[in-house]
Amino acid sequence: MSTDRQLAVVVLAAGKGTRMKGDLPKVLHPILGRTVLGWVLAAVAPLDAQRVVVVTGHGADQVEASLPAGTLTARQVQQRGSGDAVAAALPALEDFTGDVLVVNGDGALFSTDTMRAVVEGHVGRASVATALAIRGDVALPYGRIVRGPDDRIEEIVESVDATPEQLAVDELNAGVYCFDADALRAGVPRLSDDNAKGELYITDLLAIARGDGGRTLSVVAGGPEELLGINTRADLADVEDVLRRRVLRGHMLNGVTISMPDTVLIEPTVTIEPDALILPQTILRGDTRIATGTKIGPGAGLHDTIVEHGASIERSVAREARIGVDATVGPFAYLRPGADLRERSKAGTFVEIKNTTVGVNAKVPHLSYIGDASIGEGTNIGAGNITANYRPELGRGKQRTEIGRNVRTGSDTVLVAPVTLGDGAWTGAGSVVVDDVPAGALALARARQTNIDGYAERVVGGAKA
Ligand code: UD1
Ligand code: CA
């Protein structure tokens, strides 16, 4: 910052969000894994303000619980407007001198650069009250920044209070302000609710400061998309779309290929190395980390999952899993917490794996449930195998299945845990394995087949063949 003046930030997050038509406080609606308020706070953080105060009110307990520990908050008891909200922050600024950046808590698209431009314009031009102006469509329901002959802000007029002439002004109030702390303290007690909404408007502080002879300037910065406050769920979707594209663009510029990006959603917490390929309808969330040379999708849904280089995942879901080097997943696999696929291993089609290590080169290709198990290197699990690991008579926890290296299980094997299959063991198709199988042995655990001769003739009057 080009100044040694002190900076405080106040985020207004007490509003009811009536137009969202629901119970969740507006600023807590999630967008790409963060709350609306979380996006605002993330954009503010790099400004390194001496203090950040979040004004809460509607759903205050819930909003405060969503904040990182140690965040300063102030309560606005009744939601009497944005001017009253900033008033509620004043006690937290009692001993503060310097500049106060005030930001609408529903402005998830404000960028750090834009807010920095507001502070720098305010300080650099010795303003006492500054508002961020963005040129936009005059049909938008935003405040109009009305300038006087000297180019200073005369007043900001809400669209519902504006004359037709004022409505034609295309410099719109974005909801980011900077005030000299003393001017803020002087202006707030003089706000009035004599307006169309019957609220105390923060925007009236500009006209009050001007009336006191102070400089009131607008900073024109940022892009038109930053104007989008979130007032309705339609706005929420529009904002999500902008943020989603911002995140994708960052990855693409960093060397990640994303096919049909309109169908891809990646949360900002996800990391992807260059030369990964992200295919359509893929959703990556949380602390997911994707290495180079991977092929993710189409239709991959990964949450808190690590994907190592060369791995590929098609039409599959994974949560808290690790997919090792050159491993393949899907189509249609479900990896649950603790699924750990080692190098070149495979989880194939209609396969569910939980809390299980699948060894190097080991394969679970078709129609299986494998939970609480370890599968050794080079083992192949036949189609339709199940680890039956819930044994209430043995206690509450799940029982483990240990499968050695180079094991071959037959189709439709049920492994009733706890059970161990030694290295190189085999099981016959349809076996229900309840006892350990020694290394190299074949377990056959099924009833012998009986053929009843002449059955068709006797019972249903002859074979149709
Ligand atoms: C506000 C501005 C408008 C601007 C627009 C930009 C006012 C009077 N008008 O309108 O000029 O163009 O933002 O998006 O501010 N809040 C409280 N307590 C309250 C009322 C509001 O904390 O009692 C908070 C809200 O949570 C929100 C912010 O103040 O973050 C603005 O309130 P909102 O009702 O969304 O104002 P807009 O009508 O969008
Ligand atoms: Ca708003």
Image: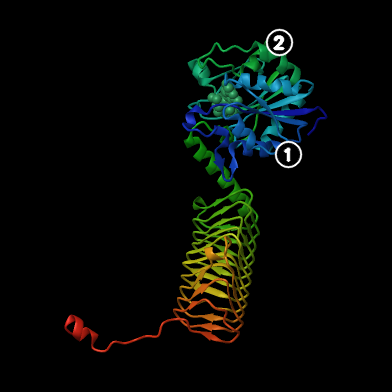
Question: Relative to 387, does residue 240 appear above or below in the rendering?
Answer: above
* Dot 1 or dot 2, earlier in sequence: 1
Q: In this image, 47 relative to 231: left or right?
A: right
Nearest to viewer (mark 1 / mark 2): 1
Q: In the rendering, which numbered label is found on residue 46? A: 1
Q: In this image, 31 relative to 209: left or right?
A: left
Element on which disc 1 rests: helix
Identify which amino acid the numbered label 2 is placed on: Asp
CA gap, disc 1 to disc 2? 33 Å
Ligand 1 within 8 angstroms of badge 2 C-beta: no
Q: In x, y percent, where is residue 226?
A: 59, 35
Question: Relative to 200, does residue 224 appear above or below in the rendering?
Answer: below
Q: Quadrant of the C terminus?
A: bottom left
Q: In this image, 180 relative to 81: left or right?
A: right
Residue 171 visible: no
Question: Residue 458 occupies which quadrant of the picture?
Answer: bottom left
Q: In the rendering, which numbered label is found on residue 212? A: 2
